[in-house]
Amino acid sequence: MDPRPLHVPDVEWEVARPFWEGCRQRELRMPRCVCGAYIWYPEPRCPTCRSDRITWVPVSGRATLFTWTTVYRTFVPGHSARVPYVTGIVELTEDAKLRLATFLVGVEGVKLALGLPLRVDFQRIENDVVLPVFRPA
Amino acid sequence: MSPISIVGVGETRYAKRLHRDLDSLALEAAEVAVRDAGLSTRDIDGIIAPGVDYAGVHELARNLGIDGRFFCAESMHGGAGVVSAPLVAQLAIDAGLATTVLCVQAIVWGTERSGNVGLPHAAMRMKATFEIPFGWYPQIVHFAGMARRHMELYGTTEEQLAAVAIACRKHAALCDNAVMRAPLSLDEYRRIPLIADPFRAADCCLVNDGAAAFIVTAAERAHDLAKPAVRVLSAAQGMVRGGEFSTLRPEYLCTAAIDSGPKAFAQAGVRPADIDFVQIYDNFTAMVIEQLEDLGFCAKGEGGPFVADGRIERGGALPVNTAGGQLAQAFVLSANLMVEAVRQLRGECGARQVANAKLGLVTGYTGAEHATVILGAA
């Protein structure tokens, strides 16, 4: 059994390590195949062309709001200090299929709506763990 | 394929906690179903028991007195595994691998998982990495996201979500074996605290213990048995694009009922307007609304008004989850919904009986998988 608390991702998992390296440098990176297709969530092969020549490339960090929910009761002990929090799905502007689940921050008093423009920001939760979060652009 | 029928159904008592072993619950439901059919446990030569592990299946067979060879299979998972069981049974019967197939589902989440029902999701590494650290967990959050987008796109309201919960509670009050029999008013619903907006506890399926079972055999054998045989007019499986991760699904507001539903209607040769009642996998109120749309009972986006004004209550245009469903009767991954559909079609449901019930539809799903069956009275 993995002893890591639920709210902390394994930033050393080889499948996702470049994502977390980017976040530590305040840069959002997404996996992209040599054929040009973005691949999300990360896969060992490109579903479009079957190539395994995939690299993590920086993206703009701009996104729009796809959906959201305000969570009043969490089942993750490490999130209890955040409650109530707003989490949601955002679509990156590079490609609508790049949908990220993320915290929405700076939204107090903001009327949330589908398509709301957002930009990435970064939150350090542990020494080597930095989460990409999104705030109104 | 040759026609099949459901000839027996059985349930244990449903309760928040029964403090009983999963295998013993499965055995009890199986025995009740076998007796209901007028069969002997030794007549069973096929077992479909989604969620029962290798040892559990063989313990069940041993306890039933199945002495020797039997057919065993499972297709799909969770509620989709239960509702697609008649299809698997039909394949086995047609192939000569079995004659009498027991389908049984037991659950002890009430005893085992009262804290957090989301742990299997935490075991998925992609979710543990890209969803849970961002608060996108557990299931209530996934489905609240769908409900919110449905509300924003189509104008679905809190009152319409409440209408599903209220209907299920009304129906459960007419059922002796239901966990949540107290009625619910719209005012009471509104006073329940939000857990993940727009969902309250009343929007979520129960977490309980219990088991339910049904017996499938060839239609031609079914006439000789104890109860009127309920005909399986179609059983279909469906899959949705994007797989397990709901965040990634292109048809984000559809279940795979958009795949299983049309197949089930085509195979049965009936239309949604012909159906007398439905038993829908109600993990959350909003998913009843979405599945009614996916199945073609109304257009996409019109599910909210469709469930309002008592239309899905007993006596309404399309009664839904007539024993209270998984929101109020018990969460048994659709196995209780199958049992209730059979009893409605036999006319055994007393105060909650749907008048002149001839055709019923049942759904079950989990994540990317969905199954729809259409059943007909004898």
Image (cartoon, rainbow, N blue to C red):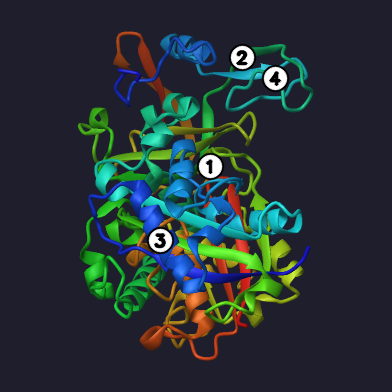
The residue singled out by tag 2 in the image is A57
Q: Looking at the rendered structure, which numbered label has been put on residue B246?
A: 1
Question: Looking at the rendering, which quadrant does residue B345 occupy?
Answer: bottom right
Q: Position of residue A37 (x, y in %)?
A: 72, 24
Q: CA distance from mark 1 to mark 4?
A: 21 Å
Q: CA distance from mark 3 to mark 1?
A: 33 Å
Q: Chain of mark 2?
A: A
Question: Looking at the rendering, which quadrant does residue B328 occupy?
Answer: bottom left
Three-letter amino acid code at the position of disc 2: Val
Local packing at callout 1 (Cα closer than 10 Å; few below 14, some 14-19, many 20+) is many
Question: Looking at the rendering, which quadrant does residue B228 occupy?
Answer: bottom right
- Of marks 3 and 1, the one in the foreground: 3
Is the residue at mark 3 from the same chain as the one at mark 4?
Answer: no
Q: Is residue B105 visible?
A: yes
Q: CA distance from mark 4 to mark 2?
A: 16 Å
The residue singled out by tag 3 in the image is B29
Q: Chain of mark 3?
A: B
Three-letter amino acid code at the position of disc 3: Ala
Q: Is residue A136 visible?
A: no
On the rendered image, what quadrant is the C terminus of chain B found in? bottom right
Q: Chain of mark 4?
A: A
The residue singled out by tag 4 in the image is A45
The front one of B227 and B131 is B227
Three-letter amino acid code at the position of disc 1: Ser
- Of marks 4 and 2, the one in the foreground: 4
Is B241 placed above or below B177 here?
above
Is the residue at mark 3 from the same chain as the one at mark 1?
Answer: yes
Q: Position of residue B133 (x, y in %)?
A: 37, 27
Q: Is residue B105 left or right of residue B44?
A: left
| Cβ atoms at labels 2 and 3 below 8 Å apart | no
Is the residue at mark 1 from the same chain as the one at mark 4?
Answer: no
